[in-house]
Image: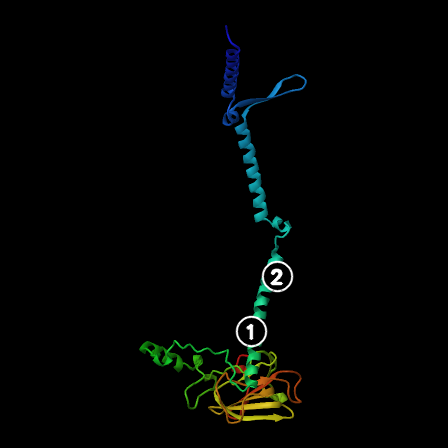
Amino acid sequence: MISIKSLYFCFFKSVQIIVMAKKEDKPKFLDKLKYKYRLSVYRDVSYEEVLNLRLSRLNVFAVVGSILLLFLIIVVSIIVYTPVREFIPGYPDENTILLNYKNKIRTDSLILEIERRDRYFNNMRLIISGKEPNNYEYREDSNVQYNDITFERSAEDSLIRKVFEDNSEYDLSVTHRRGAISSISQLHFFPPIKGLVTNSFNTSRNHYGTDIVSGTDEAVKSILNGTITLATWTLETGWVIQVQHENNIISVYKHNAELLKKVGEVVKAGEPIAIIGNSGELTTGPHLHFELWYNGVPLNPEDYISF
């Protein structure tokens, strides 16, 4: 006779076998992705088959993912390589980038100006306290032994120098050979100032020089090596300075705002001797009246100097 215990054991054993069989029959996730499905499209009236596709979940995911990836690439390319990116909030346009660059330059200039101001006030404090001010413009390199530097001129260099120095037309040396010259055109004159000629040389109107307009507070420079023979004030021409050069050449600079040299001082070609101005009664604005005299005769400066 079968006991109740045996019946219960057989029942639970049968249930366990059925559950295990169902678990074994359940497909895995990867297998589900590979299962094929058929998609058929029929006409509503005639039930005629129009489209028949055999798909799987994996194929659908791959196609949809490829389409999304291609769409993303197209959108990113349009944003990066076209002006559309300027419509994105927070993205700078060309004008903003240019303004940022200009502001950077202005900021750098302001920093330099602040440094110069601080140096100026620092030197003023040192001067007031009786100390020597700092020289911020000159920095001597202590690592360089200038006494050990030697300059040598090769034979080839000496020959080519002699060729060009003998050709007076191309003699650019302001320290030319001493002695008499056959023509003033042999000399190289340093421009006293760079600017616009407003009134040229004209002896018929007793205008024995050239008027040049230049920038405000521009330095007036000596045209050749020479000695200051006149530095004075006149009612008509204001502050006037005159330089005596070799070979009986005289240069005159009129209507200056300030003179930088005194009578008797020796100057070099290109050395500042005055500041352009508007002094004297015979002037209509800030300019330099420059005269060039050779052997006591006035010359047209524009024939020898490029302003």
171, 194: nearer the viewer: 194
Q: Residue at x 36, y 77 (%)?
A: 160
Closer to us: 9 or 239: 9
Indicate the amino acid at tag 2.
Leu
Q: Is residue 69 above or below residue 217?
A: above
Q: What colour scheme governs how the chains and residues are painted in the rendered image of this protein?
A: rainbow
Point out the image quarter for the C terminus: bottom right
Which circle's residue, 1 or 2, is located before the other in the chain?
Answer: 2
Residue placed most toward the observer, 211 or 265: 265
- Compared with 130, 39 (above or below) is above
Q: Where 135 falls versus 42 (above or below)? A: below
Q: In the image, is 269 to the left or to the right of 86?
A: left
Q: Is residue 300 visible?
A: no
Kind of residue sitting beneath label 1: Glu
Give the residue furthest to the left: 155
Give the percent coordinates (x, y) of residue 275: 58, 84
Which element carries disc 1, helix, strand or loop? Answer: helix
Q: For mark 1, does the 10 Å Cα neighbourhood hold few (<14), some (14 to 19), or many (20 or more) residues?
A: few
| Residues under numbered marks 1 and 2 in contact, where contact means CB atoms less than 8 Å apart | no
Residue under the point 59% across and 67% down:
107
Q: Residue furthest right?
A: 45
Query: For the residue labelled by badge 2, is the local secondary structure a helix, a strand or a loop?
Result: helix
Q: Is residue 99 left or right of residue 3?
A: right
What's the distance in space between the residues labelled 1 and 2, CA to CA?
24 Å
Please state the horizontal and vertical placement of residue 305, each as a whole percent of the image: 52, 81
Q: Label 2 belongs to which residue?
A: 99
Q: Residue at x 46, y 77 (%)?
A: 139
Badge 2 local density, few (<14 within 10 Å), some, or many (20+)? few
